[in-house]
Amino acid sequence: MKITVKKLPNSEVEIEGELEADKFESYFAKALKKLGENVKLDGFRKGKVPENVLLSNVPEISILEEMANMALSEHYAKILEDNKIDAISRPKISITKLARKNPLGFKIKTAVLPTIKLPDYKKTAKKIIESITEKEKDTTVSDKDLEDTIMDIRKSRAPRKHMAEGVEPHVHKEGEEHKHEEEKVELPEFNDDFVRAIGPFKDVADFKAKLKENIKLEKENQAKEKTRIKIIEKIIEDSTLDVPEILIEIELDKILYRMESDITQMGLKFEDYLKHLNKKGEDLRKDFRTDAVKKAKLALILNEIAKVEKIVADSEQVAREVAAILEHYKDADPERARMHAENVLTNEKIFQFLESQK
């Protein structure tokens, strides 16, 4: 097979080549048989139409296209391996020559892992960790923190008073004080019965003790997340890489999919939401492009650090995570679940590695 590889901007490559005529021709019978499985003709059972009959009922171009699809599907992996191409996207294939008993001409465009120049990420992490102040590290739960959270819980469980039928709503005039939300609702009494109705708590004291633990844990998680963001943002800023357009598009798809899901769960139609914003889907893709570029860079940099430091997810943890995903989402694809679990657990280990640079 004749192959030439041309590097394109933004970490993409174009593979141009020809598959010899005899090798291409060898796919004819297989392609015809596959197409014949869906041909329905009077007097023949589906999938049992003789080859000579198929030839007069299946257009030659359809056979040639199926031959090309079979040939490139079979040879693509070897083309990548022989030419040391680290592809990270689905290939865009165009056929340049397609005829019986002739070479198959093709062009394949695909994105590849870019060359990434990382900064001294260990030094970066160490410097940022050392710069964290005692105030930022403080996760003490004050009495005010506890009381504010309890008040929020009471408000969330307070019955709302509906306006009496026939009573006109009061419109506040300029300069007139607005009544606070607390005056519109009657807060439930905070006692043992109240906390027992919320969950498995013995009494108010037990509830307060456990709530304090949860608030502290939340504060610790927030502090950790802030430090991680500082570390990775500095590493991204000091790294040099070209992000393939395909990865930016994938991240944009994820952002918009999550956005559409959230809008739908609120009982709204995404199309109506866009009309309300006076925007189209393409406008949102432009709005979120900066975020998508950042997310794509993050994924590439974490992948590169994992490769350099030989960081891999624990196989037993991955198996447990996959089992949990499949139990919760019955229709989930096991392979996609495994990839997701490996990615999440590997990234967690990378961050733990960076946090250990003290």
Image (spheres, rainbow, N blue to C red):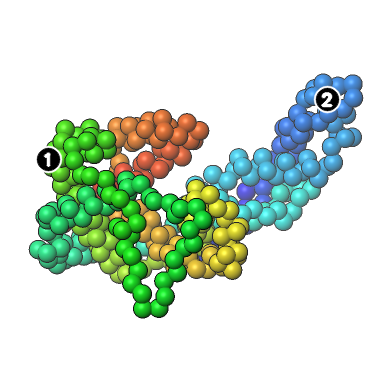
Q: Residue at x 9, y 63 (%)?
A: 134
For disc 1, the marked residue is 205
Q: What residue lies at 24% left-to-right and 39% top-to-bottom?
A: 194
| Residue nearer the viewer, 155 or 37 | 155
Is 224 left, or right, of 53 in this rendering?
left
Choose between 52 and 91: the one closer to the eye: 91
Q: Nearer the viewer, mark 1 or mark 2?
A: 1
User: Taking 276 as reference, is 353 above or below it?
Assistant: above
Q: How many marks?
A: 2
Observer able to see residue 293? no
Above or below: residue 64 compared with residue 51: below
Amino acid on which the number 1 mark rests in the picture: Ala
Q: Secondary structure at mark 1?
A: helix
Report x, y in % for residue 218: 22, 50
Mark 1 neighbour class, 10 Å CA radius: few under 14, some 14 to 19, many 20 or more: few
Residue at the farthest bottom position? 175
Residue 196, numbered circle: none
- State the residue position of label 2: 49
Viewport quadrant of the C terminus: bottom left
**Residue 45 picture location, percent across and down:** 82, 21
Q: Quadrant of residue 172?
A: bottom left
Q: Secondary structure at mark 2?
A: loop
Residue 153 point in image, percent of width and height: 27, 48
Is disc 1 in contact with disc 2, using a CB cutoff of under 8 Å?
no
Q: Amino acid at mark 2?
A: Val
Q: Is residue 281 left or right of residue 342?
A: right
Q: Quadrant of residue 314?
A: top left
Identify the residue at image location x=90%, y=21%.
43
Q: CA distance from mark 1 to mark 2?
A: 80 Å
Foreground of the two, 205 or 124? 205
Question: x%, y% of residue 267?
Answer: 53, 49
